[in-house]
Image (cartoon, grey):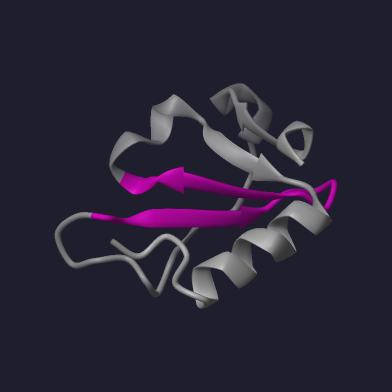
Amino acid sequence: MTKSIRHTAPSELAGALWHKSSYSGAVDNCVEHARLADGRQAVRDTKDRESGALVFDADSWQYFLTAVREGTFDV
């Protein structure tokens, strides 16, 4: 699975339409999501957009969403 998720340079994300997650906090913990032209999904830190994004293939994206919904990443 780790080969399906990778950190991507900002130049690879040119033209992506980003949307702030409804789960983002008011002050911090803000993330943005974009569906890329090739069908992959990208997530980036709203406060550090120039650092690129994590890009997921379809299977990895579904696994990630399930983990979020189940609270796997809750602190």
Which region shows up in magenta? 29-46
Q: Nearer the viewer, residue 24 or 38?
A: 24
Q: Residue furthest right?
A: 38
Q: Nearer the viewer, residue 20 or 23?
A: 23
The percent position of residue 63, horizontal first and vertical second, equals: 70, 62
User: Taking 14 as reference, is 62 left or right?
Assistant: right
- Where residue 13 sits in the image (x, y, percent)? 63, 35
Find out whether residue 40 is within the magenta segment: yes
Residue positioned 18% across, 67% down in the render: 26
In the rendered image, is residue 18 in sight?
no
Establish if 66 lies above or below 27. Answer: below
Determine if the magenta segment contains residue 41.
yes
Residue 51 left/right relative to 6: left
Count of residue discs:
0
Could you say which is closer to the camera, residue 10 or residue 44? 44
In x, y percent, where is residue 34?
Answer: 60, 54
Percent x, y of residue 60:
74, 53
Q: Quadrant of the C terminus?
A: bottom left
